[in-house]
Image (tube, rainbow, N blue to C red):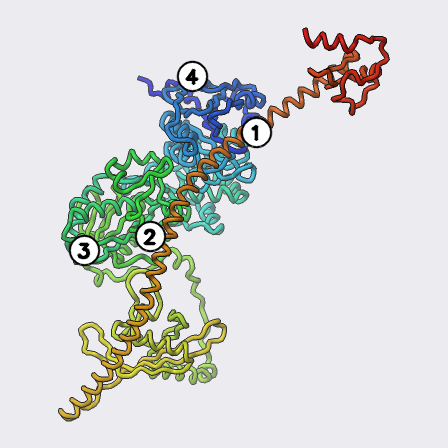
Amino acid sequence: MQSPAEALPNTHPDRRMRVVGVGASAGGLDALEKLLKSVSAHSGLAFVVVQHLDPTHKAMLSELLQRSTSMPVAEAEQGTRIEPDHVYVIPPNKGLTVAAGRLQLATPAQPRGLRLPIDLLFESLAHELGNQAVGVVLSGMGSDGAQGLRVIKAQGGMTLAQLPESAQFDAMPQSAIRAGCVDVVAAPERLVAQILCGQVQPQPEPPQDGEAFDTSLPPGELQGVLQLLKRQGRHDFSLYKRSTLGRRIERRMGVHGLSSISAYEQLLQESPQEIELLSKELLIGVTSFFRDRAVWQALRDVHLPQLLLAHADGQVLRAWVTACSTGEEAYTLAMVFSEALQATPERSACSLQIFATDLSADAIERARRARYPEAISGEVSAQRLEQFFTPDNGGYRVAKRIREMVVFAPHDVIGSPPFTKLDVLCCRNLLIYFTPPLQKRLLQLFHYSLRAGGLLVLGSSESVGQDTDVFEALDATSRIYRNRDRIKSVGIPDLPFARRQAAAPAMKEHPLPDTQNAEANLQAVADQLLFQQFAPPAVLVNESGDVLYINGHTGKYLEPAAGKANWNIHVMARDSIRAALTDALLQVSVQKKPVELKGLALHNGDNPPQAVEITLRPAEVPGLPTHCVLITFHDVAKRARPSRRRSGQVADAELQAELQRTREELQALREESKASHEELQATNEELQSTNEELQSTNEELTSSKEEMQSMNEELQSVNGELQSKLNDLAVAQSDMKNLLNSTQIATLFLDNDLNVRRFTEQARKVFSLRESDIGRPLSDLTTSLAYPELHDDARETLRT
């Protein structure tokens, strides 16, 4: 039985006919005409054109496009069989798709302004034709077409976009290019040549663990391309598997019809656009919601509840999703954790902070927007759509509580420092693209990043290999592992990898310094040693408390906080000295005089309290616009134990002083808190009121903007059609004038009121006419004819 795609007509016996879907909007008529003019009458291609049209206006698009091509151009009708070398144009107020080799029309379900007819066509082409589908995005506003191109590319089809500089409105082409789903970017008149010469390879499926792709490119020939990418400021792909790189470079070569790697390298040197497209191709952004459902079900039902029970109620768990692409996997983890939390009521106060990272800044930006097309309804159940998403303009937006669980950031897992103290680490379908040595290094990195007992989740084709001493398999089928507490024996991994290796300079031999130079440096060496030995621990901070310089060992007094790096003294100071230090910093900033803090007790874990003194001195640092403060720490040695009575008096005095200081601080805090509370309450009320007004206004403006944008695009299309018609009328009028003048007959054209509308050159001799006489009544004209009944006969002619 034939598949629908095989049912299509076939002009090439060795392959199925290719159907080219073309999407355009405002300014698209000129681009469509240029594209069709470049197509020969027997290319074997069929074109299906979708443009944003006014649903209430009779379209003239088909007859306008017919002037630009010898191929038949017709408005699409229900059930029309697709033929090669034909052009089919969408009718107004219809959605156009392809199924079983025929055109299908349907009335749009979405209201005007929310329709995405280009995406609709492209997705149907992808599902119908697979790698024979071709999608082209031309001039227009908005982002219609980008999602459809992504679906075509995922099926191995060919995707093209108009060069933004050549488009009257570049929003649609730019949106498709930014989405990383475009194979070719060119001017409209060059797109068809790219389609005909390009033989796009299907998107390669991820390899199984240890499996390599077949590629005809020798590994040595790829080095020039990789070096060129690196020199142009792109990522370093040298640690990726050569077979993976080879297949994707071959795919780009096929797009341009190139068979030589040297020719493709020359193209890269001449085309920054191709470098951008190749870089996006190599980043491999394949993802979806709940990919490998059994994995997420095992996490929800078994492993996440166990992880929650191992933590105290109210604790914040930390997770890292590497290579998150456009965010689907990170949001999937957030949804699964929420469901596991509902099933574990004894840990209902726990929460999860997810760090999601990717190399692609464009992918991160899309993930942050948290908006996905309606097609995700095939990946996410109706119950989850209702619980974790909100409908948004024909698509879905991630609910606010799920969005707030995830922090997105650009990050290079190979060359950047990792996130640490993690409870969950998801690295799915990334390791398979790396060489075995890099895989091992990354597994060591993940072991270092995870807490003891933390979960490592890998892809279905990945495993921990021989690292079973640090990772315990919890579910071999789902590739879920528990981190063992073996960090002391494994050690801290060497990181970052690639950047350190690339930046490491070659070792150079230097002659040993002579004795005379060594003696000259003795004083500097001695000064340095004395400074290190006897200088007290100290930090230099600015007025905001940001640490600028650290001297000596300050770990006893300061400690970096968990989470995102924050080098601020107010956050790093130990709890027992933080309040006093904060007050003293404020005092120094105001008075510009040194402040000494004495009698402070430093509590550090289970160790007995240590008496410390802290001195704060204002400092001017050349080159810095703000004032700085030097903070030095001094441990106070314990005194010889006095008599019991004396000891009691000293202790009472110290307690009284500390109590007095605490009372003063408490009173100041109460006054500040009261004033701040009143201000915050008033501000909060104003903000709530303003927020409600802004939200209401924003909803109205969003609705109005969408309607106006849709109407604007439709008016632009109508305006283009009318302008073309005006040009046709001007040509016709000029032709008629030339024809009449060539007849050598005196002819006078009158309107219904017998006023002059037009005349030929021969009529000038009979009526003494000038151009200014157009519009004058016939009765006002003088004539050389002996014909007094002329006016009456003209009136009678008009009447009959």
At 58% from the left edge and 23% from the top edge, which residue is drawn?
68
What percent of the width, then of the height, locates residue 196? 49, 28
Q: Is residue 123 visible?
A: yes
Q: Which numbered dot is residue 720?
A: 1
Disc on the earlier residue, 1 or 4: 4
Secondary-structure class at tag 2: strand
Judging by the rendered image, the residue that carries numbered circle 4 is 80
Relative placement, left or right, of 310 versus 714 is: left
At 57% from the left edge and 29% from the top edge, which residue is drawn?
720
Q: Amino acid at mark 4?
A: Thr
Judging by the rendered image, the residue that carries numbered circle 3 is 453
Q: Nearer the viewer, mark 3 or mark 2?
A: 2
The quarter of the picture where residue 325 lies is top left
| Structural distance between the alpha carbons of marks 4 and 2 | 49 Å
Secondary-structure class at tag 4: loop
At 70% from the left edge and 21% from the top edge, which residue is drawn?
734
Disc on the earlier residue, 3 or 1: 3
Q: Which numbered dot is residue 407?
A: 2
| Structural distance between the alpha carbons of marks 1 and 2 | 45 Å
Asked whether disc 1 touches disc 2, contact meaning CB atoms under 8 Å apart, the reply is no
Q: Amino acid at mark 2?
A: Val
At 24% from the left edge and 77% from the top edge, which residue is drawn?
602
Asked whether disc 1 touches disc 4, contact meaning CB atoms under 8 Å apart, the reply is no
| Structural distance between the alpha carbons of marks 3 and 1 | 65 Å
Residue 717 higher or lower than 657, as above or below:
above
Of residues 112 and 275, the one nearer the viewer is 112
